[in-house]
Amino acid sequence: MPPVFRFHPNAYDLGVFEAVEGTCEACMSRRTLRYTSSFYSIEEVNYICPWCVADGTAARVFDGHFSSYTAIDGIPSDPGLPATVDVAEAMEVATRTPSYSSWQQEEWRSHCGRPCAFIGDIGSSDLGQYLHEPDFAADVNGGLRWDPAVLRRYLVAGGELAGYLFRCLSCGAHRLHVDAS
């Protein structure tokens, strides 16, 4: 049974892993699932299994990460400033959680002092079901520095102006990230 990722619970359904036989370059085991999303390291790595993502082996062996630590809300780019999210959980997102595909670079949303779980892509037609939530509404209504009218009209799941939905693991609130090609 492949591992479950608490900060990316839909990783298998969203195609972050593909059914391809091969040898994982981190553990050197024959596997049938290959990671297909972002992995940042100096070495070019072609096959990472979900087990080496989940236990941190891939990040450790290749001195890499799946999401930039400082792209997680609450982790300042200045190391002298304090973090406002759980640092251990942020490291779990960066080094033991599959990333998601975005146009420029993934950004991981947070809430309640923790990184959120990535749920999937979201378009403008889906925004309404979350707009009653204050933090999600703030994200849509200028909190992400996007014109709210543009998001409400042109945001497309997996499109040129793409939305990414996150859910807080503590309270269930939703957050939004937007990126464009």
Image (cartoon, rainbow, N blue to C red):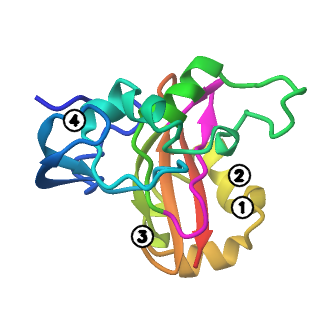
Residue type at the position of mark 1? Asn
Q: Any magenta on residue 84?
A: no
In the drawing, what numbered circle is on residue 138? 2
- Callout in the foreground (3, 4): 4
Out of 73 and 30, give the one closest to the viewer. 30
Q: Nearer the viewer, mark 3 or mark 2?
A: 3
Work out how far the residue at label 2 is from the one at label 1, CA to CA, in angstroms. Answer: 5 Å
Cα separation, mark 3 vs mark 4, equals 36 Å
Query: What residue sits right under mark 1 in the picture?
Result: 141
Q: Quick one: label 3 or label 1, which is nearer the N terminus?
A: 1
Residue matched to label 3: 157
Residue 65 position (above or below residue 96) = below
Dot 4 or dot 1, earlier in sequence: 4
Q: Where does the image place residue 128, in percent across and percent down from the top left?
A: 49, 61
Compute the Cα span from label 2 to label 4: 46 Å
Q: Is mark 3 in CB contact (under 8 Å) with mark 1?
A: no
Q: Nearer the viewer, residue 8 or 54?
A: 54
Among the two numbered marks 3 and 2 on one chain, the one whose residue lies closer to the N terminus: 2
Q: Which region is colored magenta? A: 102-116
Indicate yes or no whether the magenta region holds residue 106: yes
Which residue is denoted by mark 4 in the rendering? 28
